[in-house]
Image (cartoon, rainbow, N blue to C red):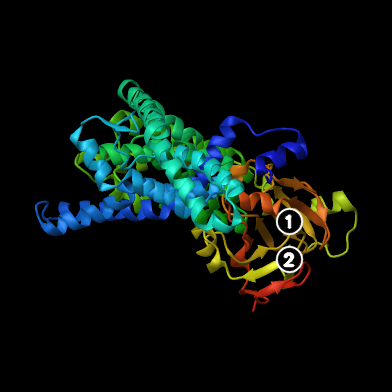
Amino acid sequence: MKDTPDQQHEESDGEKPGIVSRIISVISTTFTPVIPALIGGGMIKAVLSILVLFNLVNESSSTYTIITFISDAPFYFMPVLLAYGAAMKFKCSPIMAMTMACALLHPTWTGIVSAGEAVTFFGIPVVLVDYASSVIPIILSVWIMSYVERLAEKYSPSVIKFFLKPLITMFISIPIALLLVGPLGNLLNDIVQAGADFLNARVSWLIPMLMGVFQPFLTLTGTAWAMTPIATSQISALGYEVVNGPGMLASNIAQGGATLAVAVKAKNKELKQLASSSGFTAVMGITEPCLYGVLLKLKRPFVASMIGGAVGGIYAGISGLVRYSFVSPGLTAIPAFIGENPMNVVHAVITIIISFAAGFAAAWILGFKEDDTPDSVEKAEEKTDTAEGSVPGAEAKAGCTDETLAAPVSGRAALLSEVNDDVFSQEILGKGAAIFPEEGKVYAPADGTLTVFFDTGHAIGMQTANGAEILIHVGIDTVNLQGRYFTPKAKAGDFVRAGQLLLEFDLEAIRNEGYDTVIPVIVTNTADYGTIEPAGTGVIKTGDNFLKLSHM
């Protein structure tokens, strides 16, 4: 049988990923495909709250009932949705996994649970559990099913495998889920939620404060997903959640406040422009542009955003702020805080004001050194001169000049609109193009200086000798792999030549982990150019013309 990616990695570097990293990887891969449905359902709930608030819909009307079950559908059938992501993670059939989830939600089983009468399966007592809206049971069940399916694949004769394999998979996996794995998962689900409820009842400020402080770190390390199962379970069971939303609201707004303080205080025109746009985006609920483009580079504003998140999180916890819908917290998500308690949205607005003010003030007081950011063309040139002496093509420039970037990897060139991530497809970070790679090697698209090279290896920032600021991002959400399957061949501060190898990565292993391996290539200082156009689409090779940057 083929080695799993974890086994391959262990053999390659002698170190097996820790249990916490593996659990977070499972949660991330499982929930990623589900997020759009949860956001859709959450936003519909928010819209419904507004309609009720303004007496446009009556709670006793059929319209209210229909909108309610539409918004509840992603949460009620969450096991079915999660089964797909879990199947991708554990490398088994998504259809079989979703079928098992459907069995756990079958009306007959739901009726048996509601009746409360004892039932057995071949004389074995079956624990009565309602699996609607549950999280952990289906993830564990699909994990077990993946082993059953492999055994069925291995031992089913070829001539009858077509019908014998699904027979074995379903007839063994689903009863195991009902008899053992499902009840165990439900118990774990209840224990985790009870722990969160215990903390919230006794130290209500603690969780929002911790989320407010550490959310930037969680985003950088990919561990922000760790609390998602608890949050979604709370929304399903209680109609609201206190684990993710309140603290994330404080953190997102504080990051925006700290970044906009940089925009006001900065003298560097490019930094001011970047901080203005990414800071505005952060207060709207999307923090990646400011986090990667400003806060992480300048360091002190990063600390300031943590301070602001802590202050806002404390107020959110003390005031009892809850989130009624699963959406990314920010100004656009205020309707998600409208619910049964009319004061809840008021507390949300106050949390926003406090977080923004604290983040802005902390960033203003702590200050920052503009030389710390590679947005300065002069600094990039100094690094170039120091590292390489007098390098052709790296002479001092008054600004960005027209250039054509080469393809950093071989594969199928595509427009950013094909990337399954709004941060890239909506050009929030800037214009560019994408490549669906055929190989696991990334090369420099031009002469220039590496300004950022993440420890996880998944993202590279560089400033070309002609002044273009480039972000090469390998895969979507691959930060969650925490460096597994990535082997950097250069480091931040290096001057590199066009075509120089920057990174090797195990393309197949990353795909087997369930991650999208598309590589967006973004020009983060897009505003400095008149046009940024792909040189073409279709199959290209490393070194082929890829992006045309022009001031015209």
Q: Quadrant of residue 63?
A: bottom left
Q: Position of residue 136 (x, y in %)?
A: 42, 36
Q: Residue furthest top?
A: 202
Res 379 visible: no
Quadrant that contains the C terminus: bottom right
Q: Is residue 270 above or below residue 237?
A: below
Q: Is residue 251 above or below residue 284?
A: above
Which residue corresponds to the image point at 75% horizontal and 38% vertical from the top-left?
11
Q: Residue furthest right?
A: 389
Considering the numbered disc 2 on the image, is that residue within a helix, a strand or a loop? Answer: loop
Distance from Cα at disc 1 to Cα at disc 2: 9 Å
Disc on the earlier residue, 1 or 2: 2
Q: Is residue 466 shown left or right of residue 45?
A: right
Q: Is residue 140 above or below residue 279?
A: above
> Would you name the residue on which mark 2 appears?
410
Image disc number at residue 440: 1
Quadrant that contains the N terminus: top right
Q: Is residue 270 shown left or right of residue 342?
A: right
| Three-letter code, disc 2 | Ser
- Please state which of residues 489 and 78 is positioned toward the viewer in this rendering: 78
Which residue corresponds to the image point at 61% horizontal and 40% vertical from the top-left?
299
- Please state which of residues 436 and 402 is positioned toward the viewer in this rendering: 436
- Please state which of residues 334 and 79 is positioned toward the viewer in this rendering: 79
Check whether the beta carbons of the residues at disc 1 and disc 2 lie within 8 A of each other.
no
Q: Quadrant of residue 535?
A: bottom right
Q: Position of residue 26 (x, y in %)?
A: 53, 41
Res 398 visible: yes
Q: Position of residue 175 (x, y in %)?
A: 40, 38
| Three-letter code, disc 1 | Gly
Crowd class of label 1 (few under 14; some 14 to 19; many from 20; radius 10 Å): some
Which residue corresponds to the image point at 73% horizontal and 65% vertical from the top-left?
410
